[in-house]
Image (cartoon, rainbow, N blue to C red):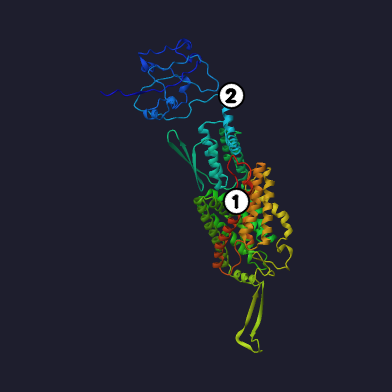
Amino acid sequence: MASPPRRRSIQFAPPPKDGGEGGRGAGGQGHSPSPSPARGRTAYAQNPTPHPRKLSGATSYFDGAHASPGPAQREQQPPQSRPRSTSQPPPRAPMHAAKPSGSRLHVPRVSVHVPGDFKVTKTSTLYEYDDGEDGRKQQSASSASLSYRDRAKMLRERRRAAIVHHVEDYVARQKFLLRLAKALLSFGAPSHRIESQLHSAGEILDVHAAFVHLPNLIMVTFMDTDTRTSETHFVRAGGRVALTSLHRVHAVYRDVLHDKIGATEGCEKLKRILQARPLYDIWTRCLLAFFCASIICVLSFGGSIVDMFISGLSASVLQYLGLNAASKSSIYANVYEISVSIIVSFIARLLGTLPGNLFCYSAISSAGVVLILPGFTILIAALELTSRNILCGSVRMVYAIIYTLFLGFGLTIGSDFYLLINPKARRNMAATAMLDSETLHGYILNSNTSTPLSQLGGTFTFMQSADSGTSHIIKGCYRNPAWPWWRQPFPWWTMLFLVPMYSTFSSIANLQAIKSIQLPIMIVFSCAAYAANKGANYLISDRSDIVSAFGAFIIGLCGNIYSRVIGGTAFTSMVTGVLFLVPSAIGNGGGLIQNYSSSTQQYSSSFELGIRMIQVSIGVTIGLFVSQIMVYALGRRKNAAHFAF
């Protein structure tokens, strides 16, 4: 006859007295009657009285410390560790016993029938320990056993990234992450830092989320580990750099992650920033574009005082079409860049072929379209490729190169269209090219006779090369030293006030508030970058990438030190100087487009322009990353992600 299955028991300690909830008598007083031996364990387990706190938040009632081992486990245990016989129920502690200090809360002992072998999975502790003297002694003893480096690391991790004062519900934290993602996309945050910023915010806010960044799109997936489900959101936004708004977004981001404000308050602040109107209207921004193009014409492209006004007017028309017509019509937005480059090139060629050479075609056309150059896009693409973000980096890089070809195509179309309308303009172009040459008539003679060679007589023209040092071609523009001062390029000492002026107008054009402490900091950093770029250009004049790396290293050093020491926003303080490096390097290479003898050579120059911009962006990328490594190599880690290039 088969023996009945062996019964196993799981026992819990009795709970203490807790007002009217601890006992089973009237008012919670007295003891429950002990079970009789005849009824055994089954009678004892019929009416267990669990402690009321046991039911709140507990996921399992089994504790491996009180479970009876199976036969295999009992054979492995030493004799002194085997549990006592369960033929009689163990004596119960009185219900009114006081809770000992520093110990865990108890629950009543319950015997449960478990047929066969039962494997108990040990779970996390169901109840917290009281912070008594025993707990503090145990923590101090465990800390004393660690080394100094381990203790310092443990203290840093304990202090770092803890939201204690402004604890919000889970939905509010999710909403903050979604709104933060939209704000970063809308105001032109560095795209290679967006994922790390959102991931850092999710970790500190204790939100299980995954982020995937694509151009103008962020996919946010919230994961629920309990139900094994996920919720995916698509955040789509597009915009250009807005320095003041981006600085405010970063300030809210730091306040929430440093536990200064809650997620709900931070979400409301981000909403107000997103819904705010631009700082300046369309006409003010057109005026700022006029000043920026005028100054960059004489700084980087060798223009005179008459060239700077024409290039400024061209940039104002460009800005108005971009802010008004292109934003209202999706059809015109697709051909906006080509149409603008055609208009600027047409006007520049018209003025450049006038008798007397009052205007320079290269300076006007280059400075007129400098505001829509994809230099910042190529820089971001190079930064993403360096950060191993291959998808976004390759897409942006190819887009910027094709965009540059569009600009070159538009400039060629505009120039050839005017030459087609006015055939005399082509002869004026040839006459302009001959101004820096010398023409001789004669014959070629033998070295040992005075008799000229047959068929070797004619007209010979000798031209000076651009790098000979005596040429009158300065950055694609013919400048005769005999001309008056208003037809000459600006002297070097004018840079002392032109560079700060351009930095000021460029920062305001990128929507930086005038009454802010960040504006003078941007101007100082931009001037330092331009000075380093100009000094390196005197030493290494034929390598635009190395020259740009020097300027980027200086501005990266200034911006990261400003963020690390003072606590400012590194990215917004560096944008103006970085944007200054691209046209400066292009101007050192001769401008966007120069006077060529045929339209084929003029169109092929756009390929060289794209390669030159990639070289400049690579140099800027290396300089920025090296400066960041030097600043953040020492010192403590940042609680939030880096908000810089």
Front residue of this view, candidates 139 and 555: 139
What secondary structure is found at the residue carrying circle 2? helix
Q: Residue at x 53, y 60 (%)?
A: 405
Figure disc tally: 2
Determine which quarter of the picture holds residue 295.
bottom right
Quadrant the N terminus occupies = top left
The CA span between labels 1 and 2 is 50 Å
629 is higher (above) or lower (below) than 68: below
Question: Mark 1: which amino acid?
Answer: Phe
Report crowding for label 1: few under 14, some 14 to 19, many 20 or more residues within 10 A (C-alpha).
Answer: some
Report crowding for label 2: few under 14, some 14 to 19, many 20 or more residues within 10 A (C-alpha).
Answer: few
Mark nearest the camera among 1 and 2 is 2
Q: Residue at x 56, y 34 (%)?
A: 263
642 is higher (above) or lower (below) than 338: above
97 is higher (above) or lower (below) than 471: above
The percent coordinates of residue 371 (x first, y second) are 60, 54
Q: Is residue 553 visible?
A: yes
Residue projecting furthest to the left:
1
Determine which quarter of the picture holds residue 179.
top right
Q: Residue at x 60, y 52 (%)?
A: 319
The percent coordinates of residue 449 (x first, y second) are 66, 89
The percent coordinates of residue 414 (x first, y second) are 56, 62
Of marks 1 and 2, which one's residue comes earlier in the chain?
A: 2
Judging by the rendered image, the residue that carries numbered circle 2 is 133
In the rendered view, does 511 fall on the left or right side of 604? right
The percent coordinates of residue 406 (x first, y second) are 53, 59
Front residue of this view, candidates 329 and 454: 454
Determine which quarter of the picture holds residue 610.
bottom right
What secondary structure is found at the residue carrying circle 1? helix
Label at residue 625: 1
Question: Mark 2: which amino acid?
Answer: Glu
Q: Is residue 314 visible?
A: no
